[in-house]
Image: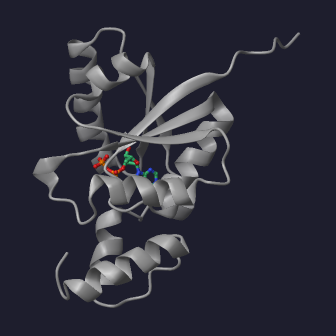
Amino acid sequence: MVKQMPEKLVVYPGTFDPVTFGHLDVIERAQKLFGRVLVAVATKPGKKPLFSVRERASLLADCTKAMPNVGVDSFSGLLVDYVKRKKVGVVLRGLRALSDFENEFQQATINRKLSPEFETIFVVTNPKYFYLNSSVVKEIASMNGKVDCFVPGSVERALRKKFSKRPGSI
Ligand code: ADP
């Protein structure tokens, strides 16, 4: 007999600079797997993102507005402290290629050391999006290329606006 399982909340943290169809695919799948998803936009000041945290969160909110069980938030500081504050035990990350694994494995292990109850779950990328990341989208957009097959319309418009103000830079 299959028992009805309680819905779980998972945190999906990232820079999302900007959100792509690859991220949205992970969010949709996470919703099916866990029930509720909290997408947490990291400040990451060292990374010098193109979009501010507010802009990144607002684009994510727009792209997930049709998903009732998905919320968007932002955080600064350590992820382990954020998930403790939110009382969430599981964090989700995506794996695209072998090259992602080393860094993700290190982060998951360090987070476990900082907080023993911290659990990271990985989803393997949809083969449709294994090549896709935010950097390549920004690079194409900065050179006035079409990015509609990589990001939703609102993100495409935001990229166009950004680069019309600062041509040639990523
Ligand atoms: P980071 O959080 O490492 O700065 P991102 O914000 O781009 O990078 O990504 C957030 C998470 O989404 C990471 O776990 C990343 O591996 C995953 N991700 C990014 N792009 C894709 C994709 N195309 N398919 C699956 N997962 C992805």
User: Farthest left residue?
Assistant: 46
Q: Nearer the viewer, residue 82 or 106?
A: 82
Q: In the shown orientation, is residue 90 left or right of residue 28?
A: left
Whole-percent x, y for residue 81 in the image: 27, 21
User: Percent x, y for residue 13?
Assistant: 38, 39
Q: Is residue 150 visible?
A: no
The image shows residue 140 at horizontal and vertical percentages of 32, 82
Residue 164 quadrant: bottom left
Q: State the scheme by which the image is colored.
A: one colour
Choose top left, top right, bottom left or bottom right for residue 120: top left
Q: Is residue 60 shown above or below 161?
A: above
Which residue does the image show at 19% across and 32% down from the upper left? Answer: 77
Vertical position of residue 107 compared to residue 5: above or below: below
Q: Quick one: quadrant of the C terminus?
A: bottom left
Q: Is residue 23 shown above or below 8?
A: below
Residue reaching furthest to the right: 1
Residue drawn at 73 percent across, 15 percent down: 5
Count of marks overlaid on the render: 0
Position of 102 compared to 39: left or right?
Answer: left
Q: Is residue 55 above or below residue 31?
A: below
Residue sitting at x 37%, y 22%: 83
* Residue 87 seen by the camera: yes
- Residue at the location (43% across, 43% down)? 94
- The quadrant the N terminus occupies is top right
